[in-house]
Amino acid sequence: WLETAQVNTLRPTVSIAPDGTYSSVEVIQEAPAEYPTLRPHRIGIGLYDLVDGVLTRRDRLEADVAGPSTPIPALAGVKAPDVLLLNDDDLTYTKLRLDERSLSTVVDHLSAFDSALPRALVWAAAWDMVRDAEMAARDYVKLATSALPKERDINLVTTTLRQLTTVIAQYTDPAWTATGWSMLAETARRAMAEAEPGSGFQLAWVRTFISAARSSADLALLNNWLSDVDVPQGVAIAGELRWQLVQALVATGAIEPSVIELERAVDQTAAGDIGAATATALIPSLSSKEAVWNEITTDPDVINSRNRALILGFQHPAQVELTAPFMPKFFADVANVWKIRDSEPGQDFLVLAYPIYQVSPETVAAAQAWLSEEGHPAPLRRLVAEGNDRVMRALKARARDASA
C-alpha cells in the first residue's frame, strides 16, 4: 500500500433474475494503466432499500476483495436492494462505482440516506465518475442541484458546491455551460432563501449564488446587495463576503472598476488590500489583464500576498475568451517566473495561473511542447505536467458531456 501509487476503483457487476433477486454479484477491481497495481481490500457491502422515502440499510456483509474480480456468493438469491453500496462504512481507500439500478435510485433519492456516511460515499463516487468521464457533467449538475439543497451535513454541502463549480466551469460541454450556471444560480437562490438565517448553510448558498450569477436579473440582485438592498435576513454584506460580491460584479462587467477604489477607501485593512487586488485583476479588459500579467510575471518585488491575490483574479470562468491570448504566454513566461519567485509564490503561479479554463487540444499541445524541452527543473516540470493532466481530464469530461 505505501510503496505503490494511485487509487484502485471498485465497481459491482450484478445480474438480477426475473424474480428480482441477484443471480450473481461480482466486485471488479481496476487500476490506472500507468500504475497497474491491484491491492487487497476488506470492504463492507451495504444493501439499502427505499422505505417511506428513506434509504434504510436492510443488511450488510463484509468481503475480502483481491485481484481483478471477486465473486460475492452470499448475495446470490438475495432480493436486489434499491442501492448496493460497496465499501459501506468506508473501510478501505478506493474509488467507488455504482451499478445502474443503484445510480438510478440515488439520482432521485441521494438525500434520503438516513446517515451522512453513505451520502458522503455516494457523493464521492459521483465526483469520481464525472472526473473520470464515466458520468456526463450535466448529469452531475442535475444530481447536485436536486439533492444538495436537502443535504444536512454542512461539510458535504461546502465540499460538493466547490466541486460543482469546477464541473460547470471545466467539465461541461461549452454549449451547455450557460445552462449549468443558470441551474446552479437558481438552486442557490432558492436554497439560501429556505436556509436558516445566519446559518452556515445559508452562507454557503449565498457564496455560491454570488459566484454562479450570470443573468441580468441575478446580477441586478447582487448590485442591490452592494447597496444593502434586498439582502437576505441573516446575511451581512461586509468583509470578505463584500469583496467576493465586488469581485463577481467586476468580473461579469456588472459594475464599473471605479467601485473597487470606493470600496477600498472604506476597507483600509490588509484584507481590503487583498480583496481590491483580486478585484483589479478581474477587470474584464485586455489592457488591464496585460498590466496584471506583467506584474505577476516580471516584478521581482511584488509582495507575496498581493502576488497571490492578483493571480487568483487573473482567470475567471466568465472570462475564458478574454484570457485565451495568455495561454501561450504562460508557457513562454513560466520558466522565468520560477527563477524570480521564491518557492511559495512560484508554486502559486504554476497552480493558479495555469490556463485551466483554456480546455483545448492547443493547450495540451503547448504543454507537451514545453515538457519536451530540456533543462527545466524537476519541481517545475512536475507542476506543469499536473496542470496538463487537469486540462486533459477536462477535455475527456467535455467529450463525455457533449455525447449525453
Image (spheres, grey):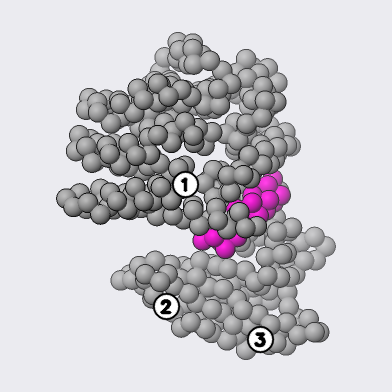
Q: In this view, does 193 lie to the left or right of 39?
A: right
- The dominant secondary structure in magenta is helix
Q: Which amino acid does label 3 sit on?
A: Ser
- Number of the front mark, 1 or 2: 1
Residue 38 numbered tag: 2
Q: Badge 3: few (under 14), some or many (20 or more) residues near its Cα, within 10 Å?
A: some
Asked if one can make out residue 116 in the rendered structure from this viewpoint, the answer is no
Q: Position of residue 118 (x, y in %)?
A: 62, 63
Label located before the other in sequence (1 or 2) = 2
Q: In which quarter of the image is residue 209?
A: top right
Residue 142 screen position, x and y as percent: 68, 51
Q: In which quarter of the image is residue 4?
A: bottom left
Is 75 situated left or right of 162 in this image?
A: right
Please name the residue that numbered disc 1 is placed on: 359
Quadrant housing the C terminus = bottom right
Identified at 71% across, 70% down, the residue is 101
Give whichever of discs 1 and 3 has the lower sequence position: 3
Identity, as a three-letter code, of the amino acid under mark 1: Val
- Please name the residue that numbered disc 3 is placed on: 24
Residue at 16%, 50% (x, y): give it: 375
